[in-house]
Each structure stands twice: as C-alpha cells, then as structure tokens.
C-alpha cells in the first residue's frame, strides 16, 4: 500500500524556516520532519511513498537524490579524479516518487495529479508537517473492517483560550477558563482511502478538506479513527522548537522505530 504525502504548500506560518526550504523539509533532530513521518510508516512495513511536492520541490528531490551522502561519512579522494567513497552507509527500504504537483495547486488538486502513481488500489494519505504515535496497522485494519471509501484519524484539539459568552448587544455576559468540554475533534491526517476517492476530486482549485470530504461525509462514506495519543503539527516556530526539545530529550512519542 502506497503512502501519499502532501508536501507542496508554502508554509507561510513558519516563514522563518520555509523561506529557505519547503516546510516538510524543516529539520527536527537534524532530519526533515518528512523523514520522521516516513520512518513512522516504515516501522509498520509501508515503504513506498508518493510525495506531492510544489513549493521549492527541487529541494525535496535533491535531498533524496543525495540521501546516502547526507546520512553517511564520506571521503572525497581528489587525487583520483574526485573519487567518492561512502563509509557506514545508512539506507532505507524506501521507494520514493517525488511529483511536482504545481506551485499554487490546492490539496485536492495535488492528490488528483498523483492518481497515475497510485493506480486502482487502496492508499494512505497524510500531511507532511505533523507527527503522531497512531498505530498505523490498527488504523488500516479499522478501515478494512468498515468497508467505506475513506478513513481519517481524528484527535481532540484542546481549546487554548478562555471562553466568552457574548450577548446580542456585544456585552460580555460571562467569562470562564477553558475546560475539557471545550475540546473538539479535528482531522489529524493519517488517512486511508479507496481509489474511488479520486472521482470526488476535480482540478487544481479543489481543496480536499472542503467539498470532497464534505460529500464523502454526506454520503456516509467517511469514517473517523479516533486517536487518543500524541499528535502535533508544525505550523509555527514554537511548535518546531517543542518537537525539537522532545527529540533531543529522547521522549519523542512518534519515534516508534
């Protein structure tokens, strides 16, 4: 089963890093967060990836092209015609297809563009900027068991601010701090999709999280796999720093390999 990774956006909310590279290539512990996500899937035996690239897509292609060099000790022997010698080579059992899905293409359009690389088979899909400790094997089993076209992983997102009760005259009637009941389920990615989902996608302007998912839900074809463990996206510099601290401390929950 192939894993499709959305990695084409501009990453404007973390512009401190994304001005130089695509957000999925921003590093946590010296490796792109995209690598961390791929290692998660690989730990469960899923090793074939299709990357929907766009913004600075050449950066992703070059990184995988030079993966051996980036992850191994290297000797450049300039006395013998610039001979390259790799030491202690570190490889992955991966097959990676990087597809330029356009600079301004929306998520649904990017998925539609890689249809020929997926073919007529069940596939997985997630975003290239978030990690979690979901049990991917159980997620796939859940999807196969219910027989619907699409499964997304949902997590509870806590309300981080105080809650206001505002009247029709704009007067604040009451104020209270956040509580557990203010949490709401969100789409955390880590989806499993049947190939028929491609039929719900149109052109480059198609936003997967809007009409396609709304239609699938209306038709009863969208199921939620509820994940109660760790999940964290990397939208901001602060979130990047938090993930870095977890990695350095050896407590990164997503490190299942």
Image (cartoon, grey):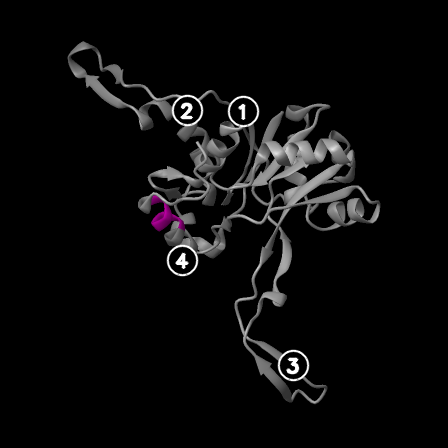
Instruction: Assign the N terminus to one quadrant of the image.
Output: top right
Residue indicated by mark 4: 238
Does 61 sit above or below residue 108?
above
**Tag 3 and tag 4, C-beta contact below 8 Å:** no
Sequence-first tag of 2 and 4: 2
Residue indicated by mark 1: 45
Say which quarter of the image contains residue 5: top right
Q: Residues within 10 Å of mark 3 (few under 14, many from 20)?
A: few
Q: Residues within 10 Å of mark 2 (few under 14, many from 20)?
A: few
Res 65 label? 2
Q: Nearer the viewer, mark 3 or mark 4?
A: 3
Mark 2: which secondary structure?
Answer: helix
Q: Which residue is at the front of the view, 147 or 196?
A: 147
Say which quarter of the image contains residue 112: top right
Residue indicated by mark 3: 165
Sequence-first tag of 1 and 4: 1
Instruction: Assign the C terminus to one quadrant of the image.
Output: top left
Sequence-first tag of 1 and 3: 1
**Along the horizontal axis of the image, is 147 left or right of 104?**
right
Does 199 sit above or below residue 177?
above
Q: Quote the CA–CA distance across marks 2 and 4.
A: 30 Å
For residue 72: magenta? no
Q: Residue at x 64, y 87 (%)?
A: 173
What is the magenta segment's predominant secondary structure? Answer: helix
Q: Which residues are magenta?
A: 243-247
Does 131 sit above or below residue 192?
below
**Along the horizontal axis of the image, is 14 left or right of 85?**
right
In the image, residue 204 lies at what x, y percent? Answer: 68, 42
In the image, residue 146 lies at what x, y percent? Answer: 77, 36
Q: Residue at x 32, y 24 (%)?
A: 69
Mark 1: which secondary structure?
Answer: loop
Mark 4: which secondary structure?
Answer: helix
């Amino acid at each position: 089963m192939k894993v499709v990774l959305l990695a084409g956006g501009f990453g404007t909310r973390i512009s401190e890093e994304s001005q130089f590279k695509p957000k999925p290539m921003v590093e946590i512990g010296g490796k792109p967060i995209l690598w961390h996500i791929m290692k998660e899937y690989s730990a469960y035996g899923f090793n074939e990836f299709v990357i929907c690239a766009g913004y600075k897509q050449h950066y992703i292609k070059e990184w995988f092209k030079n993966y051996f060099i980036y992850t191994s000790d290297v000797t450049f022997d300039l006395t013998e015609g610039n001979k390259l010698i790799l030491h202690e080579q570190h490889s992955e059992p991966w097959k990676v297809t990087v597809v330029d899905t356009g600079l301004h293409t929306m998520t649904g359009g990017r998925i539609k563009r890689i249809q020929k690389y997926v073919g007529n088979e069940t596939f997985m899909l997630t975003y290239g900027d978030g990690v979690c400790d979901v049990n991917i094997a159980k997620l796939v089993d859940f999807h196969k068991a219910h027989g619907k076209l699409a499964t997304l992983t949902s997590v509870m997102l806590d309300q981080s601010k105080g809650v206001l009760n505002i009247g029709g005259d704009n007067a604040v009637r009451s104020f209270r701090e956040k509580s557990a009941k203010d949490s709401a389920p969100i789409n955390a990615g880590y989806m499993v999709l049947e190939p028929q989902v491609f039929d719900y996608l149109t052109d480059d302007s198609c936003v997967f999280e809007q009409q396609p998912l709304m239609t699938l839900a209306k038709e009863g074809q969208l199921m939620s796999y509820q994940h109660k463990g760790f999940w964290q996206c990397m939208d901001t510099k602060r979130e990047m720093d938090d993930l870095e601290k977890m990695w350095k401390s050896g407590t990164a929950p997503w490190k299942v390999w």
